Structure formats: structure tokens, C-alpha cells
Amino acid sequence: MGLKDILVHVDDARGNEARLRLAIELARRNDAHLTGLFVIEPVDIAMLAAPIGPDVAALATLDAIQEEHRAARRALADRLAATFRGATERAGIAAEWRLAEGAVTDLVILNARYADLAILGQIDPENPGVGAPSPEAVLLGSGRPILVVPYIGAGETVGRRVLAAWSASREASRALNDALPLLEDAETVIVFSVNPARGIAGEGELPAADIALHLARHGIKAEAAYAVAEDIGVGDVLLSRAADLGSDLMVMGGYGHSRLREIVLGGATRTVLRHMTVPVLLSH
């Protein structure tokens, strides 16, 4: 079953143009309906009001700030909506524009639950932007796969040269299953295991070979590969291999360890989300 309902978060952050182009291409390729979502996130009045106190005049000023912010964001939403409608009409795909107000991550999570795939932008550390959802929170909260597009943009293709991270985990298994519609037309799929566990409880004597065989039964020609690099983080190994292969898509399970452990100690998910240079499909 292909992708039939795709959600793309739209904003004015760096990389939005590439994100929209990629979303339209996937919708066209899968004959899918594409929903563009823009969220107006209110100014944090509590934060602004903290040093001011309950003064009536000050509160009126805060209300004026809120209204000015809302008006500016609505004007931006109108411009982005026109761009979205024009691009989707030219592509000849079914599309819908949604404008919502509230906490952006919560609203993206909610809307993603009604889609097959949610397309988001990578957080730009130099300019996080207003109303940018947290990819990690959407991944963990939506129950849907997410496709994160780098803020530096993306190439002209996605899903032609795929690197799929494999660890014989629940998350990796789900990510590959969720990615099947994107792998059907791939020219190359490398299923790649880093520091594989051997034996009956691990990946056997030929790491990633069994999952490559499973993909072959879906008509996807996949090559199994592995690397042992115990002195380098798994995320760094994946990013390096993706660059070496010229991959235009990475597929991986997100947060195989607890999120708290990754926040404290680091992990492959966080490394890839911070340093990605190609679109990454994640499932949890």
C-alpha cells in the first residue's frame, strides 16, 4: 500500500522551499493527497509578563503585542498559502491548506495522526524560527513515520539511493516497513548494520542479510552491508556512509534507547537529526 495522505509542515524557516518541493514530488509519485499545515503559535505572554506584574496597562500592552504578532503571522500564512496552492496546482496533485493556532508541536502531532507520513524541517540551530515543531516530539507522539528534510535543503531526488540503518530492533523494523512505498522505485538500497550483534539473539552470521531478503520478497533489490566501528558513534558512521554512497534518503528507527538516555548520553537519533545532510525517514 502506497502513501495516500501526506502532511507537510510549512513555515518561513530555511529549507522550507526544498521541503515543499520534496513533499509535492512524493505526493505526485504516489498519487497522494498533500496537506500543507501552517501553525500560528501565540507569543508566550507568561514569559513576557513575569517581570511586569499584574499592572492593567502592562497587560493591555501584552494583548497588543499578541495581536500584532498574530496579524504578522496571518499575513505570512497568506503568502505561504498562495505559494503552496500555486505549486500543487502546477503539479496536478490533490492538496489542502490548513491554518491552525496553538502550540505548534502539539498541532503537528495531532494532524500527523491522520496522515501516512509527516514531512518536517530539521531545526536550524542558528535560526530556529518561530513556530518550528520538534521532530523528536512528533516522532514519539504521533504514531506515524516522519521525514525530516535538512535545513540546508535537499537534492532533486529522494528515495533513489537509499541507506537503511538496521539493528534488528523494533524501531528499525518498523522504519523499513514504513519506508516500503519510498523504496519501490529505488535504484539502490543498502541495508547497513553498525556493530551488529552476532548469534541467535542478534543478526546471525550475515548481518542485515535476512532483512535484505525480506525486502527482495517485496520486489526491492537490497544489498546487505555492515561495519564494525566501536570507537565511533553509530550516528557518525551512518552519516559518513550516506555521504560516501551519495544517498538521497536515509531510513532509520528512532530512539531505540529511551529518550532520556539519548538526551543524557547522546545517541544515533540525536546525532543524525543534528548533523543530517540528506532527508531522513524515522519511525519509532
Image: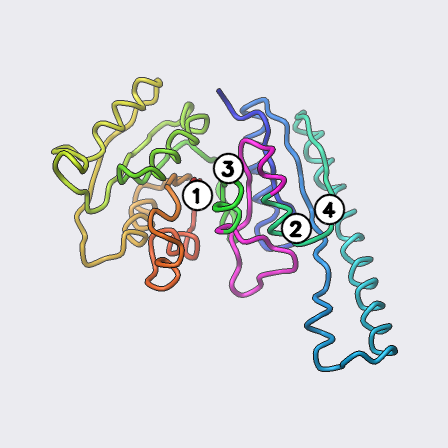
Of label 1 and label 2, which has the lower sequence position? 2
Task: Report the Cα–Cα distance between label 3 and label 2.
Answer: 21 Å
The nearer-to-camera label among 3 and 2 is: 3
Classify mark 4: residues with Cα within 10 Å, few (<14), some (14-19) or many (20+). Answer: few
Q: Which of marks 2 and 4 is in front?
A: 4
Which comes before the other along the chain, label 3 or label 2? Answer: 2
Residue at the disc numbered 4: 100
Q: Mark 3 points at which residue?
A: 144
In the rendered structure, does residue 151 fall within the stretch colored magenta? Answer: no
Does the residue at mark 2 contact the one at mark 4 (Cβ under 8 Å)?
no
| Relative vertical location of residue 233 with respect to residue 195 in this rendering, above or below | below
104 and 69: which one is in front?
104
Q: Residues within 10 Å of mark 1 (few under 14, many from 20)?
A: many
Instruction: Residue 118: name its quadrant.
Output: top right
Q: Which of the labelled discs sits on residue 280, or is there none?
A: 1
Amino acid, disc 3: Arg
* Image height of 187 relative to 145, above or below: above
Label 3 Cα neighbours within 10 Å, binned few <14 / some 14-19 / many ≥20: many
Label 4 sits on a secondary structure element that is strand
Q: Name the residue under label 2.
A: 11
Give the structural element (helix, strand or loop) at label 1: strand
Q: Which residue is drawn at 53% across and 41% down?
A: 142
Q: What type is the residue that disc 4 sits on?
A: Ala
Q: Quadrant of residue 65?
A: bottom right
- The residues tagged by marks 2 and 4 sit, at their Cα atoms, a distance apart of 12 Å
Inspect the image, locate mark 1, and give the three-letter code of the amino acid beneath it: Val
The magenta stretch is 110-136
The percent position of residue 198, horizontal first and vertical second, equals 13, 39
